[in-house]
């Protein structure tokens, strides 16, 4: 019945009554006629179109269920505000003065520097290489080269920054939900580690300088202390100023005692003889006092005008104190200077460490990465619908183009060329009779041997249709 309707339906495209009409009403009539003709054609082929559409739906469903599931885990970061209080106040005043001035103040003060820094580090090759090695992504992705694994990781990772709030979002897509969450969390950990390692703030440079300087000063202080202790131990120089004061006082006391003893000896010598016990006792005491005084002074009288220096095995003599005092004071001064420098640098070093901790941008996690429960790909229903729509559109287009092909004149150059190409290609196919070519004869023989024969025992021949 559909074939009869097709035969009796007029062909508006070739109808003479519609040719040469240029009025808008005629053009509208021709357009409406062509539209209804195509709708009629689609209605006649509705069964074929329905089958093709159903086939598209089935193929879309198969493709949707064959595609592997993908899960997405998201972590959100809130970058710190590294501006000082005065800079913040200036930015606030600029914002109140006007939107343009506020934006310019924000740009000059670097309000988004931390966010841009974090985004740049998250997209760096160093961070991606660490993640590839940490999770063995070459094996996970089935890649042989590390560059390919890094590229896959970059394609599966999305980093974005909200310019209004400054919140940074890290989205990682993976076939394993647990690995997706682990990768998102690892991005945060490696970001924090890299920012700490690559910090180039003024406090960081100051801390590095003070740390190196402290090592040098500590070595110099140890050397000065060692030299001072060796000198003091060798010369019994505990405290030269105090030792000198004590020795002068001791020498004066001995001198006074010796003068008193000598006076007593003179008085006894006028009364008693030299062999008297009291005279001899006082003489012995005077000699001992003189010996102690000479020992304290560091010399001993040999003759009337000559003297010989003697040494004190326990403490330096008064004669040695001036010479020892210069070296002692120099070593002590060096030790005190190095000690003062070391104490000052230690204080500054601790302050620089505190300041570096303040200036180094630290990662503040707003939302931790969690294990996703729902897949983000593939959208199965959408794929099925798209498959059905593609089948419907393809079947409809094929029906319309087939009708146009049938309506073409057999003497049309394009149609004649298409027939020639079809016959030439069909003649080269294995099911066609041999055309004299050795290759075609071999393929035809294989086709005849392995193709399924029809009930009559002969092979089907595919003939082109006009």
Image (cartoon, rainbow, N blue to C red):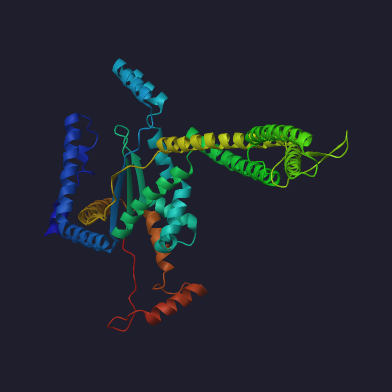
Observer-nearest residue: 117 or 411? 117
Number of on-image labels: 0
Picture coordinates of residue 116, whole percent (x, y): 40, 36
Tell me the residue at 43%/76% (across/down): 444
Picture coordinates of residue 418, whole percent (x, y): 38, 56
Give the quadrant of the N terminus. Answer: bottom left
* Residue 197 appears anywhere in the view: yes
Give the quadrant of the C terminus. Answer: bottom left
Tell me the residue at 23%/30% (across/down): 22
Picture coordinates of residue 368, whole percent (x, y): 28, 49
Q: Quadrant of residue 49?
A: bottom left
Picture coordinates of residue 19, whole percent (x, y): 23, 37
Q: Residue furthest top?
A: 97
Tell me the residue at 44%/43% (across/down): 195
Q: Is residue 412 above or below residue 141?
A: above
Q: Quadrant of residue 245?
A: top right
Observer-nearest residue: 220 or 158? 220
Observer-nearest residue: 414 or 41? 41
Q: Is residue 217 above or below residue 436?
A: above
Left or right: 211, with 413 as reference point: right
Tell me the residue at 35%/18% (across/down): 101
Left or right: 388, with 200 as reference point: left
Left or right: 354, with 92 as reference point: right
Q: Residue furthest left?
A: 1
């Amino acid at each position: 019945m559909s074939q009869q309707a097709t035969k009796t339906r007029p062909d508006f495209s070739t109808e003479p009554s519609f040719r040469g009409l240029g009025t808008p009403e005629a053009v509208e009539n021709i357009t409406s006629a062509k539209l209804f003709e195509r709708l009629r054609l689609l209605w006649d082929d509705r069964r074929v179109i329905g089958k093709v559409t159903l086939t598209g739906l089935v193929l879309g469903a198969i493709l949707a269920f064959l595609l592997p599931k993908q899960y997405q885990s998201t972590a959100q970061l809130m970058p710190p505000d590294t501006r000082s209080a005065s800079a913040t106040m200036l930015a606030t005043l600029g914002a109140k003065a006007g939107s343009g001035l506020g934006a310019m103040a924000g740009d000059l003060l670097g309000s988004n520097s931390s966010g841009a820094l974090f985004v740049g580090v998250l997209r760096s090759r160093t961070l991606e290489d660490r993640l590839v090695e940490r999770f063995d992504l070459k094996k996970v992705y089935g890649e042989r080269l590390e560059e390919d694994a890094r590229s896959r990781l970059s394609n599966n990772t999305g980093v974005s920054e909200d310019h209004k709030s400054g919140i940074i979002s890290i989205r990682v897509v993976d076939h394993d939900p647990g690995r997706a969450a682990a990768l998102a969390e690892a991005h945060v950990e490696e970001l924090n580690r890299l920012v700490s390692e690559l910090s180039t703030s003024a406090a960081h440079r100051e801390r590095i300088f003070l740390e190196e300087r402290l090592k040098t000063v500590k070595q110099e202080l140890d050397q000065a202390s060692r030299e001072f202790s060796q000198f003091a131990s060798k010369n019994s120089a505990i405290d030269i100023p105090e030792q000198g004061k004590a020795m002068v006082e001791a020498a004066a006391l001995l001198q006074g005692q010796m003068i008193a003893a000598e006076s007593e000896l003179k008085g006894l010598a006028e009364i008693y003889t030299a062999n008297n016990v009291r005279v001899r006792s006082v003489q012995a005491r005077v000699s001992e006092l003189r010996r102690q005084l000479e020992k304290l002074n560091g010399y001993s009288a040999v003759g009337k005008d000559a003297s010989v220096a003697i040494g004190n095995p326990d403490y330096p003599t008064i004669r040695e104190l001036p010479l020892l005092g210069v070296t002692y004071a120099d070593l002590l001064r060096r030790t005190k200077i190095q000690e003062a420098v070391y104490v000052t640098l230690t204080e500054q070093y601790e302050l620089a460490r505190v300041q570096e901790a303040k200036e180094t941008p630290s990662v503040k996690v707003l939302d931790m990465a969690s294990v996703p429960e729902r897949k983000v790909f593939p959208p199965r229903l959408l794929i099925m619908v798209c498959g059905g729509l593609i089948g419907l559109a393809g079947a409809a287009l094929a029906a319309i183009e087939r009708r146009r092909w049938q309506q073409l004149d057999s003497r049309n150059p394009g149609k004649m060329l298409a027939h020639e190409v079809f016959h030439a290609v069909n003649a080269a196919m294995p099911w066609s009779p041999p055309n004299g070519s050795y290759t075609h004869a071999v393929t035809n023989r294989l086709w005849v041997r392995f193709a399924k024969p029809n009930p009559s025992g002969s092979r089907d021949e595919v003939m082109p249709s006009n």
